[in-house]
Image (spheres, rainbow, N blue to C red):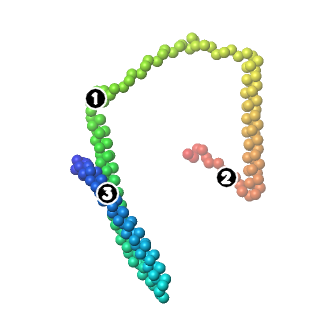
């Protein structure tokens, strides 16, 4: 069944350019007929304006136009369906070819698969032992104290900002409760 499907796909793929040219010509013909129908409708409307019973005349012209455009739409949908089927068949053929190539690669002997040329990596230079590495530069006690003071100052600023945020949140919650809008409860993390 699969070889038959593959053969059909290849046949359709080979015929695709010829059908594509026919489809393009057919689409051009449909577009031309549609343009002619639109022009004919405009001309009939102008002619209807000269008559006494304008509405009946315009309705008849629209009916004729509708019949022509529906026929053209049906022809176009046939072309679209053929194009969709052709693309689907080509896609199935490509998938089948890919699967066949993967099966062939998987069934090939291991030595043949690894026989692909690859460049060897250059050897890494040996690492120095930790003891041989240069020690970190010594920091004077004054510099160390200044670093610790900066760290302490950043931590305190962070604490002040967190406290300010908590106070703002509490103030907003109290205002909502005062207005009669209780705060929505937080989701339960254990419920996940």
The residue wearing badge 2 is 184
Work out whether mark 2 precedes mark 1 in sequence or the reverse, and give the earlier one. Answer: 1
The kind of secondary structure element at disc 3 is helix
Task: Give the farthest residue toward the bottom.
Answer: 52
Neighbour class for label 3 at 10 Å: few (<14), some, many (≥20)?
few
Residue 145 visible to an observer of this rendering: yes
Element at badge 2? loop
Mark on residue 112?
A: 1
Q: Alpha-carbon distance for marks 2 and 3?
A: 65 Å
**CA separation in Å, label 2 and label 1:** 66 Å
| Label 3 sits on residue | 21
Residue sitting at x 29%, y 35%: 105
Residue at 42% across, 81% down: 60
**Who's the residue at 76% across and 18% down the image?**
142
Please provide percent x and percent y for residue 75. 34, 66
Viewer-side residue, 100 vs 150: 100
């Amino acid at each position: 069944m699969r070889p038959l499907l593959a053969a059909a796909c290849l046949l359709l793929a080979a015929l695709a350019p010829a059908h594509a040219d026919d489809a393009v010509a057919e689409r051009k013909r449909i577009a031309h007929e549609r343009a002619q129908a639109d022009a004919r409708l405009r001309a009939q409307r102008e002619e209807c304006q000269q008559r006494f019973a304008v509405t009946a005349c315009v309705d008849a012209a629209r009916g004729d136009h509708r019949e022509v455009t529906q026929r053209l739409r049906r022809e176009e949908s046939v072309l679209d369906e053929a194009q969709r089927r052709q693309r689907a068949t080509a896609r199935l053929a490509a998938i089948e070819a890919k699967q066949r190539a993967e099966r062939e690669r998987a069934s090939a002997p291991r030595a043949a698969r690894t026989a692909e040329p690859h460049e060897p990596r250059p050897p890494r230079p040996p690492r120095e032992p930790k003891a041989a590495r240069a020690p970190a530069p010594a920091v004077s006690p004054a510099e160390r104290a200044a670093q610790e003071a900066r760290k302490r100052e950043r931590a305190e600023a962070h604490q002040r900002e967190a406290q300010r945020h908590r106070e703002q949140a509490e103030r907003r919650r109290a205002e909502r409760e005062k207005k009669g809008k209780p705060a929505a409860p937080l989701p339960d993390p254990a419920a996940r």
